[in-house]
Amino acid sequence: MKKILTCALLACALLFSGTPNASAAYPDRPVTIIIPFGPGGAVDIAARILAEYFQTKHNITLNIVCKAGGAGAPAMLDVAKARPDGYTFGFPAIATFSTTPQIKNTGYTLKDFRAVAQVTVMWLSLAVNGDSGIKDIKGLMEAAKANPGKVNFATHGALSTQRLFMTRLLKAFPDVNLPHVGYTSGHEVSTALLGRHITSAFGVTTNQKPYVESGDFTMIGVSSPQRLPDFPDVPTFAEQIGDEYTFASSHGLVAPKRVPNDRIETMQNLLKEALADPDVQAKFAKAGLTTDYLPADQFQTAVNDMWKIIGDIMKENKFN
């Protein structure tokens, strides 16, 4: 009897001591990706390509949640306050993510997040209607001077990267009044230009590419240092105004600060694998996106640097 009891206790001990190792590997349930923009934009497209890969290759479900408005603050507050278990991430444009918390109380700051991995880098682009007759920045500024208050530009938010960039760009044209119109996503901005509700649309090349290819839009400037292969006839802002008018918009996953290192590493490695996959790369390319993976440590450095750059731009233009 004593021998039987001892064996039973030993079996129980082995069972419970083995429970952690026997549990399903992370992630064993759906992972939520919160995007601080409306649906249909470049980040949403990138997230859904990744979601398809995760589901097909690893049977991991990524729930993509687009939460626009508030210059991204409500969405990123949801990420900051999420349970730090590795099942909720944010997928912001890092420049946009760096704006609002530096000028008002959003309930979070940079210290409430940690980087996971960079996914893609996008270039800013400014477009007008294809039949507008405007071919470059100078043409837009001349139209604005000739029609005071009637020529404008739109972006996906009051504190969007594009608006900050345009505010800086307008310093080169001090006698021009170019009002800003805010929407909630790049897709909405493009739709507004297509419907002629606005004069010019400042977005990213990914969102504007189909309209440029169809002839509906004329792209009059890009923020890259050299002309882009997809748009060889589009002049850069740098060549039109000056070398200081270049800007890359980095996008990637961030997590609540206290997510364990092993889960950050797991998600980082899954993203690295996905972004190296030829099929994913082809789908990104078709959407006008590039795969620009950076691991957590390098992406954290990029996030920290962008926070400072955006802070300097806002001070320079008296946003705060």
Image: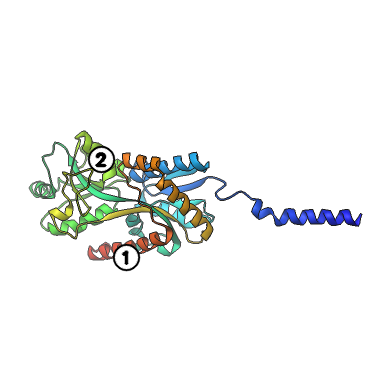
In the rendering, at what x and y percent does residue 103 appear? 33, 62
In the rendering, at what x and y percent does residue 229 appear? 22, 45
Amino acid at circle 1: Lys
At label 2, counting other C-alpha atoms closer than 10 Å, the crowd grade (few under 14, some 14-19, many 20 or more) is many
Image disc number at residue 123: none
Q: Nearer the viewer, residue 66 or 50?
A: 50
Position of 121 relative to 278 (above/below): below
Q: Nearer the viewer, residue 30 or 18?
A: 18
Looking at the rendered structure, the secondary structure element under dot 2 is helix
Specify whether 268 is left or right of 308: right
* Quadrant occupied by the C terminus: bottom left
Looking at the rendered structure, the secondary structure element under dot 1 is helix
In the rendering, at what x and y percent does residue 238 appear? 17, 55
Position of 159 relative to 192 (above/below): below
From the image, state whether disc 2 or disc 1 is nearer to you.
Answer: 2
Where on the picture, by quarter, is residue 100? bottom left
Of the residues under marks 2 and 1, which one precedes in the sequence?
Answer: 2
The residue wearing badge 1 is 308
Image disc number at residue 209: 2
